[in-house]
Amino acid sequence: MRSLTLAAALLAAAAPAAAQVYRCDSAGAVTYQNAPCAVGAAARQVDTTNAGFAAQAVDWGAVAAIRARERADAAERRAAESAARSRAAASAAAAQRNALVDAQQAQADALANIAEQLRLARLDGVGVPGYVGPRRDWRRR
């Protein structure tokens, strides 16, 4: 965007202009300006045809508008980048949360499977595999 501002300023400087330059002498102070001199000041129009450049006024309002637009564009870019970072962080947090929920569900499923195996083993009368149980005296009935 700065190059756009520079290009606009160069184009403005390169374009031939029919601007007039006035030499104003007021109370011993000499000023050169694009507008006619104030009342009471000695005025003289300066010939700029042989000066090697075209004297012209710079449109500072246009320059200010270009710079304001550049600042607005930069602010929009920063806001878009910040929003993208926020979306990425929210997505990462959601993925982490989903992974935790999946792990908890897998653990709950494993515990339910063990409980079901124990219930079925009791119903079959086989007992739990690997569990001996309380020792009973075989002579005693």
Image (tube, helix red, strand yellow):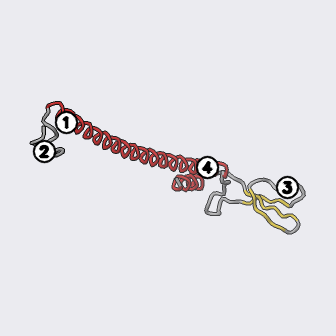
Disc nearer the start of the sequence (4/1): 4
User: Picture quarter containing residue 101?
Assistant: top left
Residue assigned mark 3: 38
Foreground mark, 4 or 1? Answer: 1
Q: Which mark is residue 137?
A: 2
Q: Are marks 3 and 2 in contact (CB under 8 Å)?
A: no
Q: Position of residue 51 (x, y in %)?
A: 65, 63
Foreground mark, 3 or 1? Answer: 1
Disc 3 and disc 1: Cα gap in Å? Answer: 105 Å
Foreground mark, 1 or 2? Answer: 2
Q: Nearer the viewer, residue 103 or 139?
A: 139
Residue assigned mark 4: 68
Kindly identify the amino acid type of the residue bearing the numbered disc 2: Asp
Element marked by disc 2: loop
Element marked by disc 1: helix
Instruction: Please state if 70 lies on the left or on the right of 114 as rendered.
Output: right
- Residue 24 position (above or below residue 123): below
Residue assigned mark 1: 117
Kindly identify the amino acid type of the residue bearing the numbered disc 3: Ala
Q: Are marks 2 and 4 in contact (CB under 8 Å)?
A: no
Disc nearer the start of the sequence (3/4): 3
Q: Residue at x 30, y 44 (%)?
A: 103
Disc nearer the start of the sequence (1/2): 1
Instruction: Please state if 21 lies on the left or on the right of 105 as rendered.
Output: right
Image quadrant holding the C terminus, namely top left
Q: Position of residue 70 (x, y in %)?
A: 56, 50
Instruction: Please state if 14 lies on the left or on the right of 95 as rendered.
Output: right
Element marked by disc 3: loop
Kindly identify the amino acid type of the residue bearing the numbered disc 1: Gln
Foreground mark, 2 or 4? Answer: 2
Q: Position of residue 91 (x, y in %)?
A: 40, 44
Q: Nearer the viewer, residue 9 or 18?
A: 9
